[in-house]
Amino acid sequence: MKPTNKKINQSAYQSTPYQSQLTRRESLKWLGVLSASALVTSVGGCSDFLNSQNDASNVVKGHWPNLKLSPITAHGYGKDPNMVTPSSPWPKTLTADQLTLVATLADILVPRDGDVPSASDVNVPDVIDEWVSAPYEKQQRDRLTILSALTWIDDESRLRFSTPFVALSTKQQFEIMDDIAYQNSDVPEPFQKISRAFSVFRKLVVAAFFCSPEGTKDLGYIGNVPIMGAYPGPTAEAKIHLQKIIADLGLA
Amino acid sequence: MKNFNYDVIVVGSGAGGAMAAYTLTKAGHKVLMLEAGRDYDPKTETPMFQTNGQAPLMGSSTVDKDFGFYDATVDGGWTVPNEPYTTGENSEFLWWRARMLGGRTNHWGRFSLRFSEHDFKGKTRDGLGADWPFDYPDLAPWYDKTETLVGVCGTNTGLDDMPDSAEGVLHTPPTPRVPELLVAAAAKKLGIATAPMHRAILTRPIDDRQACFWATKCGKGCSIGAAFQTTTSLLPMAKATGNLKIITDAMVRSVDVDNSGKVNAVTYVDKKTGNDITLDAKVIILAASACETARLLLNSKSKHHPAGLANSSGQVGRNITDSTGANLSAHIPALEGRPIYNEDGHTSNHLFVPWWGHKQQAKGELDFPRGYHFEISSGFHEPGASVAGNLQGYGKQLKDEVKKHFGARIAFSLRGEMLPNKDCYMEIDDQVTDKWGIPVAKFHWKWSKHELNQVTHGLKTAKALLETMGATLDKPLPSAEQAILKGGQIIHEVGTTRMGDSAKDSVTNQYGQTWDCPNVFIMDAGVFASNPHKNCTLTIMTLAMRNATWLGEQLDASTGPIAAWES
């Protein structure tokens, strides 16, 4: 678990269309002047947490942004969409800086791995954007969850390090990740809620990665190709492996 | 339809309607078919090979596409815009409809298991529900003919819950895959047999339909015709006779009668214009689906038929059942990181667990009267929105965990026989109409102990199977009340116009001919006298073939019943 963060951020900025005209330095400068509340205000919400925090000692008590999002009113794809040439009719709603944060987090979740691209290399942030911008009930719920998580992460980052998350060092980013990326009963109370919310985000990022052609290949899925004649079934190797399982379980 | 002198009007183009139309047109009768949905062509509209990654929301389900973006269903699902249905107090019921040529055959699971003599005579055996008005040997040759025409892969197993097909009828089924073979080993240990699932999938070409090429989910529809749907088989074949005309976007409002109460016409709404059109009818076959047909009959009230058409028994809308459903799944550690190969196969279970408890039930060892089966889900599926499971952490370690878990989960889906009961019925909601002004169906639902006890047994059995494969269930088993899926959710709703031996307690005779109106036939699952756990479509088609053949013979006879119908 040692992703090289520099590369992650560069790939996020360089390969995704929503950042393609910005250099890394310009992005950081621009992000540096944005506050977390501006981040959410741009989608119609606000995080009133930071504004009310004058005392850094409150940090450990836990916090949660109280986002007020305006509802998505776009139409869905309807009950008779073109399935042969699929498309999403609803507009995407994430801002450039939200996408950058998504890309940074996505690449921490799914970093480049040898020849296998990272999440942002395969446009995972676009899939997240499509998801949180969709007019359906589940996606609207996930939108609040995910935007709250994004805001929480930046709030936490500013409270701990006085810096937005994307500008933190890898070590600092991982420090926050270690607190929120595990959803179980051992998680301290202040991180329970963010762990649950981050879990929703994580599932989507991982799924979006593996649904990309490169991710599907990395997963090992080799179906969706026509085979003439009889279905070949398990390979010899798979059969031998199965026999061992059956023997080990005492089912032979 | 001035230039088309039809003998029979068929309402509905799904399993029953298409088979009836095919059978009659092949026998030289002219058929006019009315379909409430739009025209649909699987050859050009099926998303073969399109991936989840290409679909909105990674293909996951939404209220627009309840079974995922690529499900073949057009203009339907659990809701149809502007065509609501309602439920009674404390009742939950889901009604799947499709508004498209071919109806629900475009997306169905293609599971094609025969009912047996045991299934047809449940009441004789345990006093519950109703017997069917014929015996298995009466239907067996029609099952053979239907399976031959439709194309069903499977094997003759000799198991008591699976009647054999005639020699040479079944197509060779695909070989089982690793998780299914593991289930088979675990089941054997528990004294339970597994068998190849019978599915309406060609594994050798017939007519102009190709053999399965082992890719792309059948629920999307099948542009090569390997997975059976009426739009690539029965309907084009019937059209090729020159004896079939189809009107789509034709939502039937009523079946009409003359001054003497004799049925003589059908009125439909042309959905493109909103205009009502009345067609003269000599003989009408209703195959609009069990609940849509019952709705139509109940809405076709007249002086001579005050409780609705063909409802002198009061049984229209009664006796509705669905299959019971419940799911249990677990991660199987022994399958982690197993060798990769292409496990698409015919994209559904190659092996399943047929009901094994007839003997125990006969001995009174079980506290539920009717059986169930398990369908098995497993394998290296194409990734979708849920591929990450509940895995934790981040970075390469997280990704490696997902890869290790790929293809290591096994799920059992219980599908069981439900018995009719007095609390489960449909009627017309006199407060609500659809966009066309047609009063809507209102459903009432309550499971009985027969179903709940069966589900309890199924959950325990599934748990035992999973644990035998080394799984640890992460939480206690749910109660049957928690686990049982909603009424209608398995989409096997049947029995609303059941057949029988007597006009007193049934709606049709054994040929689907309504007791009250001899020129009105029902050829959908409404006529089922019981709802065996084996999925209804094969038997809908078999009955439609048999009963349309009988109808055709009556039409051919210059004297006899048809003369009486026309007098």
Image: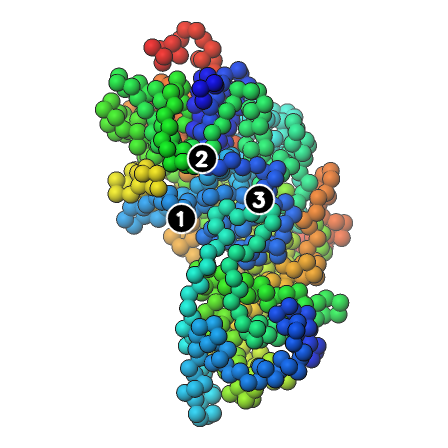
User: Which of the two discs, 1 and 3, labels the residue nearer the N terminus?
Assistant: 3
Amino acid on which disc 2 is placed: Asp
Numbered disc in front, either 1 or 3: 3
Q: Residue at x 51, y 67 (%)?
A: A93
Determine contact: label 2, label 3, CB under 8 Å. no
Within 10 Å of disc 3 (Cα), the crowding (few <14, some 14-19, many 20+) is many
Are tags 1 and 2 found on a single chain? Answer: yes
Amino acid on which disc 1 is placed: Lys
User: Which of the two discs, 1 and 2, labels the residue nearer the N terminus?
Assistant: 2
Disc 2 designates what residue? Answer: B249
| Tag 1 secondary structure | loop
Amino acid on which disc 3 is placed: Lys
User: Which of the two discs, 2 and 3, labels the residue nearer the N terminus?
Assistant: 3
Colour convention: rainbow
Disc 3 designates what residue? Answer: B220
Would you place residue B562 above or below residue B23 in this image?
above
